[in-house]
Amino acid sequence: MSESKLRVLFVASEAYPLVKTGGLADVSYALPNALRHLGVDVRLLLPGYRSVLEQLSLIEVHENIKLSPLKKPLRILAGTMRGELTPVYVIDYPSLYDRDGGPYQDSTGKEWEDNALRFGMLSKVAALFGNHSLLFKPHIIHCNDWQTGLVPTFLKFNADHQARTVMSVHNMAYQGLFAPEVVELLGLSPESFSMFGLEYHGKVSFIKAGLYYADWITTVSPTYAQDIQTSEYGCGLEGLMTERQNQLTGILNGIDTDTWNPETDPYLARHYNIENLPVKVRNTQALRNTLRLSPSKQAPLLGMITRLTEQKGLNLLLPIIPSIVKTGAQLAILGSGDKKLEKSLQKLASEYPKQLSVNIGYDEELAHQIEAGAHLFLMPSKFEPCGLNQMYSMRYGTLPLVRRTGGLADTVVDATPDNINNKTATGFVFEKNDSNELLSCVERALQLFRDKATWRKLQINGMSSDFSWRKSAEQYISLYYQLLD
């Protein structure tokens, strides 16, 4: 089989720029495009959220598809994202997907009560493609996180299935746990509801279903593939991951180097590259103006773009923000999540209005401006399967400061004296999930910030790193062929 004939259905619950809550959306946009550039016929399957229907020009390709327990037939629509190569299939069933609010929660932040049905149907439709019952007949169905975890289950208990399955874990902490009645509701095989299947402490676990029945499992970084085999990061499924370690591969995510490019980024005040790196300061000045921070030219500016959760290290950062501000540094934070964390950050911002800017929500333009304008980018995560912002930061000459875990350990080289001397250092790394250790690492970084020549060398090291999707896409293609052979 030649690569031009390899057919892959990439199934996901979100994809940039149509719908995005986190890094999965970026992967669902960039990886299919990278595969397609390498000659793979890859197509994307998404739920028909309102934002998806509004942004795509769609035509009907399959109608009158009757699936239990839905009361009405559903349709499959098809289109392409503007300016992109990857075809997109959309499940059109308005009562499930065309709603106010987000893909997983309503406008108040409460989980949709029928998420088991909504994403069970996403898996069920994907399985129709895997049975070669629909127009596109993939060799591989590439599933992503719990929302697509039932695809391998539906195929496993259907003797007619043709496609092989790959299950990618972007974050093991989100598992899709539902009441056992879901088995009958979705028409799953009763045999699948056991400890040797999708049962998890008396509930149905969508992610365990995918991990148990998929032909192969991938994670989004090599270190995270090891992490999830431990009790600290396996979230109760470390035993299963250890049993399946011979069908488990860690492939580091790439980044979209066209969207995240300081030479062409439309959101920046000034474009720059390695050759004219001093121009980056114009973006720092513009960011301070936008966020109404003190215009001090000497103060280091720390950025953070994140979900506001304990997993992202907010519990480590909050207690030390006053200490960071006392050093003369400034912070620009963008994100949303835990309401208590949001309020705590907003309270601190009111106390330090010229040193701390807290922006609740997600703003793509501001995200790019923080990456370009900050000197340091904070990612003190408790765990981080891959992380993309540390790679965006390096591309923008903004040094990442991270905890040594998951993909952060795989991508950031600590600025130790030896690493500085051998020209490999790209950022700052600390070990323990501890506020004092984070503060010590920040202080170490701020001390080095005063050494402009060394700081510039670290910026150049990071900007010279290749985090494009091509290498990762080539690894996925190799894995697909391995499965087919």
Image (cartoon, rainbow, N blue to C red):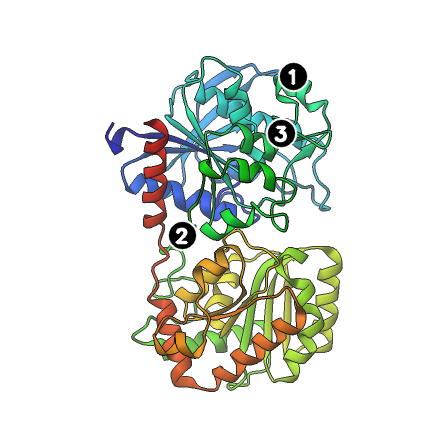
Q: Is residue 90 visible?
A: yes
**Which residue, given by chain and number where applicable, does mark 3 sit on?**
118
Which is in the foreground here, disc 1 or disc 2? 1
Cα distance, mark 3 to mark 1? 20 Å
**Which residue, given by chain and number where applicable, does mark 2 sit on?**
254
- What's the residue type where badge 1 is placed? Pro
Regarding mark 1 in the picture, which secondary structure is present there? helix
- What's the residue type where badge 3 is placed? Arg
Does 346 sit left or right of 280 as displayed?
A: right
Residue at image point 53% right, 17% down: 157
Which is in the foreground here, disc 3 or disc 2? 2
Q: What mark, if any, has residue 456 been given in the picture?
A: none
- What's the residue type where badge 2 is placed? Gly
Which quadrant does the C terminus fall into? top left
| 432 or 337: nearer the viewer | 432
Q: Given contact means CB atoms under 8 Å apart, are the residues at marks 3 and 1 in contact? A: no
Cα distance, mark 3 to mark 2? 29 Å
| 57 or 466: nearer the viewer | 466
Q: Percent x, y for residue 347?
A: 75, 70
Regarding mark 2 in the picture, which secondary structure is present there? loop
Q: Is residue 460 above or below residue 34?
A: below
Residue 162 placement: quadrant? top left
**Which residue, given by chain and number where applicable, does mark 1 sit on?**
190
Residue density around tag 2, few if under 14, some if 14–19, many if 20 or more, within 10 Å? many
Cα distance, mark 1 to mark 2? 39 Å
